[in-house]
Image (spheres, helix red, strand yellow):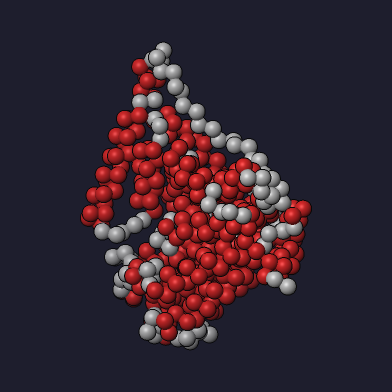
Amino acid sequence: MDTSTILKKISDPFVKLAERHYPDPFIFLIILTALAFILALTITDTNLVEATIAWGNGLSGLLSFMTQICLTLIAGHALAHTNLIQKILHRAAQIPQSENQCYAWAAFISGICTFISWALGLVAGGLIARHLAQVGHERNWKLHYPLIVASAYSGFIVWHMGYSGSAPLFVATDGHSLQNLIGIIPVSDTIFSNWNLLTATVIILIVSLICSKMTPEKSKCQILNLNETEQHQEISDTYNLSLFNRLNNYHPLNIFLGTAVFFYIFLWFNYEKLSLNLNIVNWSFLAAGLLLANSPTHYARLISNAVHTTSPILLQFPFYAAVMGLMTETGLVSIISNGFTTIATQETLPILSFLSAGLINLFIPSGGAQWIVQGPIFLEAAANLGADPSIIVMSIAYGDQWTNMVQPFWAMPLLAIAGMQIRDIMGYTFIIFLVGFFVFGASVLFAPHLIQ
């Protein structure tokens, strides 16, 4: 029995279960909220009134961060839909030479883009899935579109170990809140450490291979013909337009604005060196989109077409922030985290950090927010046990990204671009979740030995 047959037998039950019974992401959130209330009321000293106040106070706790995330998705989506980037994506989608290679390629491209920037990975993943379907149609290939989209989302499993990872960037920033405890940990010890780069390479390659082996029976595959719903037509007849309409389509105007933003970014890096935050990522996407758009009106249309990717974030993020407020103010996060640290030793703290982060990520899917409430507990334990803090930082990062394969929140923007439902892909990403457990678990167990 070959690998493909084995993987199909393993994945088929999960795929069928997800297709029939996996709840809508908003229902998933409501269930998690109810569970968080039950846990807070049963294992903490909080009463119902106090829990409700803590939950309600959290509703507005991450509004500024939510705005940043929405801008990232909008600007990234608009950039990806400029003519040049569309041509690059379409050419990239022509590289696979067989149906199975399409699934591997979707995961690989998404993983590489995600390592650079989590937002780029989500946008590029959704778009490369569409372009692969288009190329498959041109070549009369029978493809399973849900698996292509699931493969693209699977690449997101490396986001927190990459250049936009919240936890490693936090501890690398001078003046961070834990500096008195652990000092400054440079990204050379976390993101760009040999063991993290090795782990990222291994997980991307393994995920790509597995995605190519989960292809269902030919009867479920078809020659796809996705209707393009986003058309960006420029007004070409400018002879009879008013002065203001001519300005709307005057290319040098958006070139000027994009150049101004890039000049600011250049000055930022000149003074701040390699310091990268979400704002700089946003301004980079914005500037590049302005420079590549055909006109100011064209870019405005690209932004308008991108807004739909943010609707799930706008709806659900305040409620996830409320869950975070509930878990933080009632001490629930501390109880869960301390439950892991009290049984930890110097050798087992990394794997327990990983598992704890994976559990808490289900309730708080924002990596930055999760780090704020969980990171200090485990870094204090690391200081007490003599464990390497850089390994603990990355262990928490690994746990956060690992359970995104079963937590639907971050899949929603990609699904909005690809035009799929969460239940269509979650059966496949559950297999990636299982694989991630072994790869990341082995990495954090052996990392102390690799860096000695």
Q: Quadrant of the N terminus?
A: bottom right
What residue sits 64% from the left and 66% below the top?
A: 431
Nearest the viewer among 446 and 315 is 446
Instruction: Locate residue 13: give its quadrant.
Output: bottom right
Question: Who's the residue at 30% across and 42% down the image?
Answer: 261
Q: Is residue 442 above or below residue 47?
A: below
The x and y percentages for residue 290 are 37, 37
Residue 165 image position (x, y, % from top left): 42, 62
Residue 231 versus residue 437 in the image, above or below: above
Query: Where 398 sits versus 240, above or below?
Result: below
Image quadrant occupied by the C terminus: bottom left
Q: Is residue 295 above or below residue 343?
A: above
Picture coordinates of residue 40 (x, y %)?
60, 67
Q: Is residue 95 left or right of residue 292?
A: right
Is residue 436 visible in the rendered image? The answer is yes
* Residue plotted at (52% across, 65% down): 204
Corner quadrant of residue 23: bottom right
Q: Is residue 335 left or right of residue 24?
A: left
Q: Residue furthest top?
A: 240
* Residue 192: image location, x then y, percent: 37, 68
